[in-house]
Amino acid sequence: MPDLLLELFSEEIPARMQRRAAEDLKKLVTDALVEAGLTYAGAGVFSTPRRLVLALEGLTTESPDVTEERKGPRVDAPEKALDGFLRATGLSKDQLEIRDDKKGQTYFAKIVKPGRSAEDILANVIPATIRNFPWPKSMRWGAGNLRWVRPLHSILCILSDDNGARVVPFDVDGIAVGDTTEGHRFMAPGRFAVTGFDDYAAKLKKAHVILSAEERADHIWHDATNMAFAAGLEVVEDKGLLAEVAGLVEWPVVLMGAIGEEFLGLPPEVLQTSMREHQKFFSVKNPTTGRIERFITVANRETADHGATILAGNGKVLSARLADAKFFWENDLRIAKSDMSAWTRSLENVTFHNKLGTQAARIDRIAALARDLAPVVGADPDQAETAARIAKADLSSEMVYEFPELQGLMGRYYAEAAGYPAEVAAAAQEHYSPLGPSDDVPTAPLSVAVALADKLDTLAGFWAIDEKPTGSKDPYALRRAALGVIRLVLVNGLRLNLDRFIDAQLIRIEAAVNHDLDDSALEELLTEIADHGVFGAAFHAVKDRLDDLHDDFLALENKVPDASDDLLRFTHDRLKVHLRDQGIRHDVIDACLALPGSDDLALLVNRAEALAAFLASEDGENLVQGYKRAANILAQAEEKDGVEYRYGADVKYAETAEEKALFAALSQAEAAVAPALASDDFPAAMSAMSALRAPIDAFFDTVQVNADNAILRRNRLNLLHEITASCGKIADLSRIEG
């Protein structure tokens, strides 16, 4: 079986597109070959800045013959129908087969399509792949109509086996196929022929091209770390930059240069960001001080002066870039030390969202919510409000304008320079976290308060204006914000009722976007919610106290609870995804959500974890079955009788020992479960409930619930209700599947 080697040789392909393009090439070609009837033993793809390469091993030489059967007209059909069928199949009448069926006799045709050679199939598949290649961006050049990411210069496509190599004949817009390629642009110009993949890879390496991106990356990292180690330094790890640089060079040559002494006082993150974003340099730090002192650059060629000229040129460009960064840093420090609030005031002219007002208005809302949250998370309310007010001040700084990815971090530096306490400054950096499922979660109380306030304001804001995620679209990253709230609560073990804080923030947002609302009424409403935590009662208390309220204020009675309930459901959905990744089933979470207090996420998760562990035991599984049996019998009886059995069972009507034992077990379980639930000790509550398993099993094995005696039947049905009520205190077991 032959092997296929395909190379598409072009001008430099952007590094960020190379890996995806290589995978697309593999999928498009192999899928088309399989669809055409060819098989292969293995496939590999490679990319360099100037080439995409596909190598297939063990490709079949031709596709199999395909036999197609077609049903034709009946034998007694008009002659024209038969003539049309013969034309469509390309057969003569004597080649048709006649078969009997229920309606008589019918013509059938067997059409054999002969297999095609691998060369013929490739000659169709590869040009089609090239012409329809899914580049994110592409271009045309010259007089041709072909679109490619950069001008495509040549195509190498050969099939090789024991008999040698042969070119697959085709062309694409005048670009002929051959068996030659080029090496390094500067170090080995000129074309050479190859006979197969091994020959190709070996000759490329001699021509100063490392075909594998992974090998280039390993080479860069190995040389860079050795070079830094020899100088007593360390390379700052950056896997994204390493992958990008490996896509910029075909023959990596690692060089280390020095950073000007005048720039060493810049924050290490500023140096690292500036060098990575502008120059694609790696940062080299002093492991003792943490200071960035040198840089690593990767050239694409060896030079006679061992890179001295390259380093000198890069050093000049880097100095110019760092001079800008130094200016931004010093200017920002001057403002921070004199009046950091000037940055916050300037945010009055920056729109956060056209329906939600300015960044400054949002900061006011976040500060108010952070003050409310502070006592719950163990922070000082005054400090929480202060931290929230300066947390986003750095958005007005020149450094963050130049490097937006440094927001928060620079806020911490500037807050420290302005003389704020360390914990307030830390909140400026940490309040954006967590940004994803694996990001670190803040644990300092001030940072937690501001981070929660920031995320809850984002969620409440977009719910207030009905800009919610739909399907796969989430332009404001609201799913990430909800997950951030969940992780902040769970990691820090916070016991708080989200409903109350969501309601308060929805009211603040209404006040910000609707200027017809009475400020004093809103303040009273916020005070009532803070005191009682229930929107409905708070709203009616304010409405009863105040006269002549605006209609828009009265509309809050329905608007706020609807938005709050919907946002809480959304948060619960994200919690299900989060817990599912930790091995807790969705039906277990649903069973816990059905109980009151589901806006206390820490309580909810503690209950779900205890229930999941309980259900994993034999007692738990059997108790659920006993619960469902009791619930089903009770539901059927209530539907039949038209009454609800909720009056309490009396032990004096118990006839059998098993019935009396169940009464006793329910009483004992209630005595143990009540204090356990009161102290939120869900494992203890579940353990107490497990004692019901054996008495319930024995009851159903020996007692006829629907007895002929009406008094006994009614008492036993009431006893079933006590079973379901007792079990229902730990979770809604009817929602457990199975």
Image: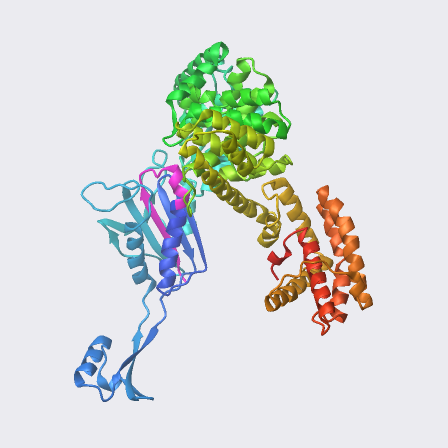
Residue 563, horizontal then vertical, whole percent: 47, 40
- Of 664 and 110, nearer the camera is 664
Classify the position of the C terminus by image quarter: bottom right
* Residue 5 in magenta stretch: yes
* Residue at x 34%, y 72% (from the top left corner): 65
Residue 503, horizontal then vertical, whole percent: 51, 35
Looking at the image, residue 507 sits to the left or right of residue 89; the answer is right
Picture mark count: 0
Residue 561, horizontal then vertical, whole percent: 49, 40
Q: Is residue 352 above or below residue 634?
A: above
Q: Is residue 107 above or below residue 499?
A: below
Q: Is residue 307 visible?
A: no
Looking at the image, residue 30 sits to the left or right of residue 290; the answer is left
Residue interval drawn in magenta: 1-20
Displayed quadrant of residue 702: bottom right
Residue 436, horizontal then vertical, whole percent: 52, 38
- Of 381 and 350, nearer the camera is 381
Q: Is residue 704 visible?
A: yes
* Residue at x 21%, y 46% (from the top left corner): 145
- Of 625 and 195, nearer the camera is 625
* Residue 304 in magenta stretch: no
Looking at the image, residue 714 sits to the left or right of residue 298; the answer is right
* Residue at x 62%, y 27% (from the top left corner): 375
Looking at the image, residue 513 sits to the left or right of residue 133; the answer is right
